[in-house]
Image (cartoon, rainbow, N blue to C red):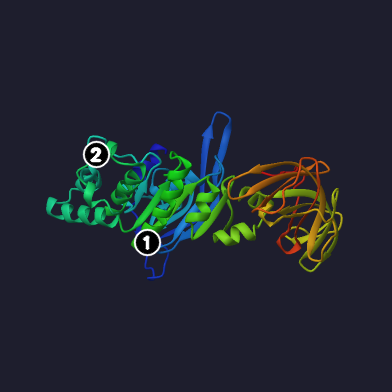
């Protein structure tokens, strides 16, 4: 922040909004950082809303701008352009010279480390923001007791953070975030420091708490499984922009771009050239044979270089190489099969392409065996290849 902006800021502006208006409304947000190497655009004209009781997840790789967006809403970063409204009140607007500090935004934040005071017991940790806000003790005690009851921690209010499990510490942090706010909570990768088994269990707990308590949430993560499990809507971010926003099913089954298809879950990709387009269906000539799929936006002409993408779990393996109507079929050689407990992950080679297929039980195949791989044309997507792009492969 520059000194001039700190001294000239105006208080937030309250606008009339309906009862169905979003809890958070971000419009045209821009944030630039100036470094020795030049200017870095962290947010580039980003707009997003969060409705009442909605759980929205910001998903993307490191450096995509998701944390900058979260911190801008929290008041920990000052945007260079655009507006932020919380419950109809403008809390940040570069054009109107408005910026409210974090303590005046009436929201809570749950951090990666939970940020609990080790020398305070559970009750005192949750009461801290209320005491910091100069509330009277007669108001503090019932509010803290109610918050702890709602997250199921009434029995441990006298315990210290070191005596609690990771899940309990997370719930203390959540209770503290909710006790002094109007039910709007920002989460900054709160599960990333936990092991996989605990993380999976806490996802379930968090969904249950959010549904029973009805708070609105914006949650930052780079973990795709976490995003799919938690979100009402996912905003996939790419280099300071939102590449796509939608329900988990929409993002996974109908990705808008090659980037989204490759980032969410696992995706096989084979590069080829368009030979025919009929309506929304595209026929592609590839080194492994003709493939058919749905044409994404930007696939427009014969001869265009494209990426054919499909999911490992949509693949079926067979020793019968006969092509079937409605299925793309490829002759492959089995490189290896990995036992994953409930599933097998098969790695197959088709020319220079490595393809992953996931199966539950079924036939076993030997290393080097010729295997016919098929996947539905209706679940195959065809995306334009940007100039100079290389094949993404399988991840």
* Mark 1 residue crowding within 10 angstroms, few (<14) / some (14–19) / many (20+): many
Asked whether residue 147 appears in the rendered view, the answer is yes
Q: Which of the two residues, 183 or 83, is positioned nearer the viewer here? A: 183
Provide residue 189's location: percent of width, then percent of height.
45, 44
Residue at x 47% of width, y 60% of height? 49
The residue mark sitting in front, 1 or 2, is 2
Where is mark 1, residue-wise?
87
**Quarter occupied by the C terminus:** top right
Please determine whether, in this image, residue 341 is positioned above or below residue 381. Answer: above
Name the N-terminal-most of marks 1 and 2: 1
Asked whether residue 73 appears in the rendered view, the answer is no
Provide residue 86's location: percent of width, then percent of height.
38, 58
**Quarter occupied by the N terminus:** top left
Where is mark 2, residue-wise?
160
Mark 1 vs mark 2, CA separation in Å: 35 Å
Instruction: Name, please, the residue furthest toward the left.
Output: 138
Judged left or right of residue 260, residue 6 is left
Q: Which of the two residues, 277 or 316, is positioned nearer the viewer here? A: 316
Residue at x 65% of width, y 53% of height? 361
Judged left or right of residue 335, residue 341 is left
Provide residue 188's location: percent of width, then percent of height.
43, 45
Residue at x 53% of width, y 45% of height? 222
């Amino acid at each position: 922040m520059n000194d001039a902006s700190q001294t000239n800021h105006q208080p937030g502006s309250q606008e009339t909004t309906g009862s169905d208006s979003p809890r958070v409304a971000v419009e045209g947000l821009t944030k630039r950082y100036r470094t020795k190497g030049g200017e870095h655009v962290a947010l580039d004209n980003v707009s997003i809303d969060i409705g009442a009781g909605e759980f929205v997840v910001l998903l993307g790789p490191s450096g995509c701008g998701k944390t900058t967006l979260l911190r801008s809403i929290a008041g920990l970063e000052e945007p260079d352009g655009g507006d932020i409204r919380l419950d109809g009140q403008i809390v940040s607007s570069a054009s109107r010279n408005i910026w409210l500090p974090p303590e005046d935004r009436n929201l809570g934040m749950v951090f990666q480390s939970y940020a609990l005071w080790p020398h305070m017991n559970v009750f005192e940790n949750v009461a801290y923001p209320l005491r910091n806000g100069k509330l009277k003790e007669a108001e503090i005690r019932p509010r803290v007791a109610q918050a702890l009851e709602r997250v199921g921690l009434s029995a441990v209010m006298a315990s210290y953070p070191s005596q609690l499990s990771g899940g309990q510490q997370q719930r203390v942090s959540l209770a503290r975030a909710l006790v002094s706010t109007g039910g709007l909570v920002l989460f900054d990768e709160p599960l990333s420091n936990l092991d996989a088994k605990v993380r999976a269990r806490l996802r379930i707990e968090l969904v249950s708490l959010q549904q029973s308590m009805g708070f609105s949430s914006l949650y930052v993560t780079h973990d795709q499984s976490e995003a799919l499990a938690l979100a009402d809507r996912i905003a996939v971010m790419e280099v300071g922009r939102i590449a796509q926003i939608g329900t988990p099913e929409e993002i996974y089954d109908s990705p808008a771009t090659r980037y989204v298809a490759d980032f969410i879950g696992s995706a096989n990709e084979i590069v080829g050239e368009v030979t025919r387009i009929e309506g929304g269906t595209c026929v592609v000539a590839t080194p492994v044979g003709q493939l058919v799929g749905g044409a994404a936006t930007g696939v427009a002409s014969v001869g265009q270089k494209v990426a054919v993408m499909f999911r490992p779990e949509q693949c079926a393996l067979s020793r019968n190489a006969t092509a079937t109507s409605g299925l793309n079929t490829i002759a492959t050689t089995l490189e290896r099969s990995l036992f994953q407990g409930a599933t097998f992950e098969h790695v197959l080679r088709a020319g220079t392409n490595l393809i992953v297929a996931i199966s539950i039980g079924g036939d076993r195949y030997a290393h080097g065996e010729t295997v016919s791989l098929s996947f539905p044309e209706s679940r195959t997507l065809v995306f334009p290849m940007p100039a100079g792009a290389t094949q993404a492969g399988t991840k």
